[in-house]
Image (cartoon, rainbow, N blue to C red):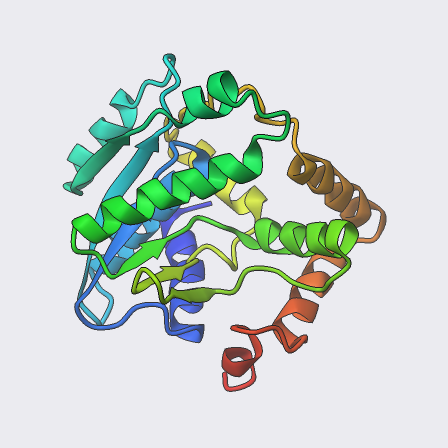
Amino acid sequence: MKLQQVMSYVRRAVDDYHMIEEGDKIAIGISGGKDSLTMLYALHGLKRFYPKRFEIQAVTVDLGFQNLNLDKIKEICEELQVEYTIVSTEIAKIIFEDRKESNPCSLCAKMRKGALNDAIKSAGCNKVAYAHHKDDVVETMLMSLIFEGRFHTFSPVTYLDRMNLTVIRPLMYMNEADVIGFINKYDVPIVKSPCPADGNTKREYIKQLLRKLNLENPGVKERMFTAIQTGNLKGWTEYFGNK
């Protein structure tokens, strides 16, 4: 997938859900994976011609794994002339050594977001962009439905009142396959997650389930996504119904 196509998806999401306003300073959470790097390139490209002026800054929360190498990410940010901040933490030590968590993902995500939000506010950003794509939206809904018994997923735009910070998700119209296509076409170097829990989570189970459902029932993922847009979920219908 070409960068222009990625930017088209992102532009549509940004416009449909009013994600960017004049003068925004947007932090991009960079994990080093394919999704966050795709978003970095997309927002950097969009910034050049979008009618509302905005700034971007890249931020990575280093969890403290010894084998994490962020040199390639630094090179990309230097090439794009995007300011890049690395937040050093001991989250990995706390999770895996001190607490020895058997189900580490929830606590890790909470601590990581806390460190990220603190860094974002310190940098003077008023928004943060998360790299959740369409598959993430649907997978989260399925996780909520299967494990919690409720129809719920995250919204395109979320205001965190305690932080006075707005979360936006510009990749929400992109399929994971589109992201992979972009990364492969431009040979973008990604950083493999060093987390020992990577690939062994409930989300991975749901990802494989959705893949199977979509293979056996072509188009089911798109229908689920439409159900989310029209299902009276907070943060969705008020925009979707006025497009």
The quarter holding residue 144 reads: bottom right
Q: Position of residue 134 (x, y in %)?
A: 57, 54
* Residue drawn where x is 59% and y is 55% of the image: 137
Task: Identify which residue is drawn at 21% across, 36% down.
Answer: 85
Q: Mark yes or no: residue 12 visible.
A: yes
Q: Between 204 and 242, which is closer to the camera in this rendering?
A: 204
Q: Is residue 198 above or below residue 137?
A: above
Across and down, in percent, residue 87 comes to 26, 33
* Nearest to the observer: residue 42 or residue 54: 54
Q: Residue furthest top?
A: 67
Question: How many marks do you count on the picture?
Answer: 0
Q: Residue at x 38, y 34 (%)?
A: 186
Viewer can see residue 182: no
Q: Nearer the viewer, residue 68 or 213?
A: 68
* Location of residue 66 in the rendering, given as x and y in whole percent from the top left corner: 36, 13
In-front residue for pair 125/51: 125
Residue 133 horizontal side relative to residue 88, left or right: right
* Residue at 58%, 49% in the rendered image: 136
Q: Position of residue 90 (x, y in %)?
A: 35, 24
Horizontal side, residue 196 vs residue 120: left or right: right
Task: Give the answer, above or below, for where 28 lies relative to 72.
Answer: below
Residue lying farthest right? 216
Q: Please tell me whether residue 133 is drawn above or below residue 100 in the rendered image.
A: below
> Going by the picture, which residue comes out furthest to the bottom?
242
